[in-house]
Amino acid sequence: MCSGGFAKCLGISLMPLAVVCVLCNILLFFPGGKVADKENITDEVWYFGGILGSGVLMIFPALVFLGLKNNDCCGCCGNESCGRRFAMLSSILFAAVGALGAGYSVIVSCVAINRGPRCSLVDAADVNKTRWEYPFDNGNYLKNHTLWSECKQPTNMVSWHLGLFCVLLAMGLIQIVLCAVQVINGLLGALCGDCCGCCGGVSVQAAEFTSTAKKINITKDFWSSF
């Protein structure tokens, strides 16, 4: 497969991942699937890890990768092959931007998972009152599921928070891997050129050489007949 064609496959893979991350971040604004006051939403949701990091900053590299197969940068000094090499080299920069965005989303997700959600608790001083705060400490709720009952409202808030941030974490790690693969692919494309272009050039040169050899043999046979 050509380096440009492989980059297109990576771009196709990154697009749905970016959409999933944006949707997960949006859903986190509705704790437990319900509308909540701004001050009751978990702080890490406002860092927009899924929307900005794995979303917007990932869409631009994905679009660049999608167009690499047919992009020759309008040629380079009139040389199409040089233009394709430059396009592959420039894709490394976009891959790095995508990896940084996904890395930001991964960090935000890890912090949010370790901290746990903000939810409504029963006030110890007055059982008829509730207060919103972070009931968990250093991810202790991850191993001890009995602590989840401390969150009274919204319903299923812990599983909602944990599930969506775990999806963001997994998607971010996959995006980092795909961007790293494109860095390698871009280097190979810049150094070695597009394999289709190389193979095509070799085939054309071989055909021309064969045609020239046949002409020489015909000429020799013609003169040897006298």
Image (tube, helix red, strand yellow):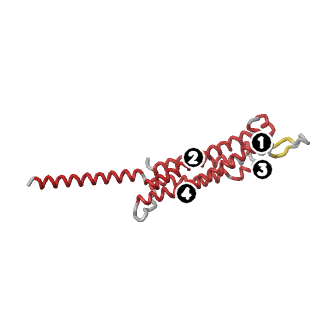
The amino acid at mark 3 is Asp
Say if 190 sits above or below 143 in the image.
below
Q: Determine contact: label 2, label 1, CB under 8 Å.
A: no
Query: What residue sits right under mark 2 in the picture?
Result: 177
Residue at left offset 50%, top offset 47%: 9
Task: Tell me the CA gap for discs 4 and 2.
Answer: 15 Å
Residue at left offset 40%, top offset 64%: 78
Q: Residues within 10 Å of mark 2 (few under 14, many from 20)?
A: few
The amino acid at mark 1 is Pro
Task: Tell me the CA gap for discs 3 and 4.
Answer: 40 Å
* Residue that sits furthest to the right in the current view: 125
Task: Tell me the CA gap for discs 4 and 1.
Answer: 43 Å
> Image check: 164 left or right of 153?
left
In the foreground, 92 or 55: 92
Query: What residue sits right under mark 1 in the picture?
Result: 154
Query: What residue sits right under mark 4 in the picture?
Result: 93
